Image (spheres, rainbow, N blue to C red):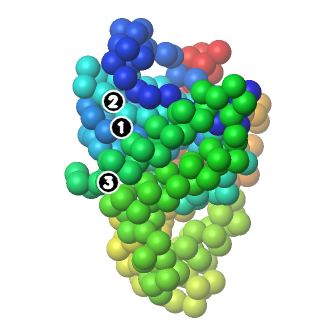
Amino acid sequence: MNSPISIIPLTCEILEPLSLNPHKPHRHDHEELWIITHGSPSHAVDFMAEKLQSPVVVYIAQGKVHSFIPDTETQGWLIRYKTDFVPQSRFNFYSAFADKVYYQLSEDYCSTTLHSLCTIMLKESAELIPDYTVMQHLLSAVLAKLETDSKRDYLDNKASGTPRLITFNNFLRILDNNFRRAEGVEFYAEKLNMTARNLNLITRSVFGKSATEIIETRKLREARRLLLTTEKSVSEIGFELGYNEKSYFSRVFRKKTGATPTAFRTQALDLIS
């Protein structure tokens, strides 16, 4: 990807060849935002497959292995952009702690506004010399609109100042600095001056997961990244992420992904090589 941003309308003409001959899984060197307004396509991130129900927005962070298979009804927009093109969005921040990187939109979401923003961005990108400053502002507006329309409370600006959400975000920031350590919920609860039970109540109410699940997800997302991008052994990766025993690390990884770390690495590299 040479330019800092590109936008593609997901029309029948563009998607029909892809549905007949899907791209094999590939790794991104950029961010991708799939805005699916119609249809039920299938997609996979890091080989974790999911069937989508529109309207939905799918966010794929840089470095993720991704594949996408549209159905005959699929329509929408695909926006690709360099990581440093816009300030870190909420989609980017929260994707590190969740298995699923898609966000369901309300059935009555404001498609007119979103469609208009994407159309203007498409017209600007078609100019002989696109104004990337304008496109940067438009993308920021699209992200803000999607964050507002998402059903996820933690993406909602209106809720961002609530004590519960402040505590939750503080937990995620502390976790992001410490997830490589062999620490459990009690460690993070102590940092937040609360009990482990209360921390779990907050994470479940905001994110739908226990604190333990979020900690484990963050570790295993990093494990998948290291398996795909480094030559470190499984033991080295497990130890780096706070698992003192290779066998325990492998059991946790297999339970979460359906494959051992070694099998995941072999299958993934074979597919994307």
Q: Give the class, few, some or many, for how many residues have Cα within 10 Å of label 2's Cα (few <14, many ≥20).
A: many
- Badge 1 is on which residue? 36
In this view of the protein, can residue 23 be seen by the observer? Answer: yes
In the rendered structure, the answer to whether residue 24 lies left or right of residue 200 reads right
In the rendered structure, the answer to whether residue 82 lies left or right of residue 11 reads right
Amino acid type shown at disc 2: Gln
Q: Nearer the viewer, residue 65 or 220?
A: 65
| Local SS, label 1 | strand
Gap in angstroms between the C-alphas marked 2 and 3? 16 Å
Q: Is residue 176 above or below residue 1?
A: below
| Local SS, label 2 | strand
Amino acid type shown at disc 1: Ile
Q: Give the class, few, some or many, for how many residues have Cα within 10 Å of label 1's Cα (few <14, many ≥20).
A: many
Please provide percent x and percent y for residue 126: 60, 27
| Local SS, label 3 | loop
Quadrant placement of the N terminus: top right
Amino acid type shown at disc 3: Cys
Q: Nearer the viewer, residue 25 or 160?
A: 160
Quarter of the image where one finds residue 72: top left
> Residue sitting at 32 percent across and 54 percent down?
110
Lower sequence index among marks 2 and 1: 1
Lower sequence index among marks 1 and 3: 1
> Residue sitting at 74 percent across and 43 percent down?
236
Gap in angstroms between the C-alphas marked 2 and 1? 6 Å
Q: Is residue 217 above or below residue 202?
A: above
Lower sequence index among marks 2 and 3: 2
Q: Is residue 30 above or below residue 217?
A: above
- Badge 2 is on which residue? 75
Are the residues tagged 2 and 1 within 8 Å (C-beta)?
yes
- Badge 3 is on which residue? 110
